[in-house]
Amino acid sequence: MADTDKIEIRDVTRIERIGAHSHIRGLGLDDVLEARTVSQGMVGQKEARRAAGIVVQMVREGKIAGRCILLAGEPSTGKTAIAVGMAQALGNETPFTSMSGSEIYSLEMNKTEALSQALRKSIGLRIKEETEIIEGEVVEIQIDRPATGTGQKVGKVTMKTTDMETNYDLGNKIIECFIKEKIQAGDIITIDKASGKVSKLGRSFTRARDYDATGTQTRFVQCPEGELQKRKEVVHTVSLHEIDVINSRTHGFLALFSGDTGEIKQEVRDQINSKVIEWREEGKAEINPGVLFIDECHMLDIECFSFLNRALESDMAPVVVMATNRGITKIRGTHYRSPHGIPIDLLDRMIIIRTVPYTEKEIKEILKIRCEEEDCQIHSDALMVLGRIATETSLRYAIQSITTASLVSKRRKAAEIMVEDIRKVYSLFLDEKRSSKILKEYQDEYLFYDDSLPKVEAENQQQQQQQQAQAMEVEGN
Ligand SMILES: Nc1ncnc2c1ncn2[C@@H]1O[C@H](COP(=O)(O)OP(=O)(O)O)[C@@H](O)[C@H]1O
Ligand SMILES: [Mg+2]
């Protein structure tokens, strides 16, 4: 069968590269949603993974709209990793839109429009459609080309099932498809009558002995039974945003490819919403709410938060997952402080999943998985040193050191990364702590030096202490 026909554009643009989270293949849960210690590229963080698994289950059932979940925890504790795992666990059918909080700031589009589009990208619509197809074995095929070589081609095809045989006249477009698919007598094919698309299912068993030399890819199938013409139900999945763009008069559907959709009028959205509800009632379409993931959500400002507050109440809202590594901090766009920089009223609607720092053993396991992902051999001593470095500096620094250390070891023409490679890389590349120490030591030699930074930190600490004291007072009362 010609697989090229099945490729969707989405698959073509996805280039397989080793990214920060490419080792993650799911949440690594068992049937009762209990987290396995190491599975599908996920290590530790069991509570949070289990919680994420429950959210995934909730989304799969698709009954609940507009819930908001917050992943909160220190930097590099796997918040983004868990979101990636959720997307993998949900599969291709359920829409999962991933964005960073800072993506909404654009000159072409206001913030709330960017959020609306993201929300609507996360709602899928399964549209059922019946089409007529002709399915059978090609008995004879005859294509007449004009003598001049150009111009319309005409042709005829005889097709059969086990029960009947019929002749069809072929139009120019279908002939092109026949030529492209290299259809010949003995092939089992389907022709979509509406679109004129021809696809090859395989070769008929009765023709199996026609040629002695057949490739391994040749698939042999039975000649179909019954009528040649059949009705077949096909299901298309599109997102509400795609329908919006196609129906927005100012931009053609081509805007979907360029991403240059501009703002979409509220009237268009309202019309589409009522149409969708109509389709749902008629049983033509099914709404499939997915997930919108907003990473670094402290980058959203108060206007966005209040917009989300309202948007989540709509019954066509997806499940929103946010992640942040901030503590008590200013809400962007105000002078008020709040936990995670999120207003209390929105926080009140959220369920919060906390991620905790990893133990040394878990870190070593993650590093091992990353080494496999990057195709590097590492000596166990070197892995131990790297694990120690990770606890002392950060997990991210250690993960990045794998790539550089492997390059160093390759220059030595060694098969695996040894301790000396790690040592070399550690001396070549600074981590955040050493870098800031050097900056402090040599402050006079740098052009500008702003020594107010430590003060800001101290101020923050002071404020936190005050808040804690206040909280204790309240509890005391
Ligand atoms: N539990 C885990 N299992 C496997 N890899 C993890 C895990 N947690 C984090 N990582 C990896 O560690 C790195 C940092 O994690 P990340 O999710 O980016 O942290 P955060 O978003 O919380 O700051 C990423 O490369 C991530 O894939
Ligand atoms: Mg992150």
Image (cartoon, rainbow, N blue to C red):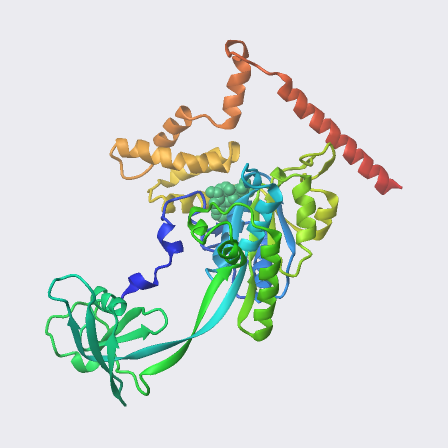
Q: Is residue 147 left or right of residue 32?
A: left
**Coordinates of residue 203 in the picture (x, y in percent):** 22, 75
> Which picture quadrant has residue 190?
bottom left
Count of marks placed on residues: 0
- Residue 340 drawn above or below residue 308: above
Nearest the eye: 83 or 170: 170
Q: Residue furthest top?
A: 444
Q: Is residue 366 depicted above or below 222 in this figure?
A: above
Q: State the residue lying farthest toward the right.
A: 477
The part of the image, by quadrant, that contains residue 159 is bottom left
Taking depth in this image into account, of 185 and 404 the one nearest to the observer is: 185
Please state the horizontal and vertical placement of residue 40, each as a whole percent of the image. Answer: 45, 55
- Judge whether 153 appears above or below 137 on screen: above
Q: Say whether residue 318 is visible.
A: no
In what quadrant of the picture does the N terminus appear?
A: bottom left
Report x, y in % for residue 160.
24, 84
Task: State the residue at coordinates (70%, 45%).
Answer: 306
- The residue depicted at 56 percent of the width and 74 percent of the height is 283
**Looking at the image, can residue 417 be seen?**
yes
**Residue found 53% across the figure and 26% down from its top:** 433
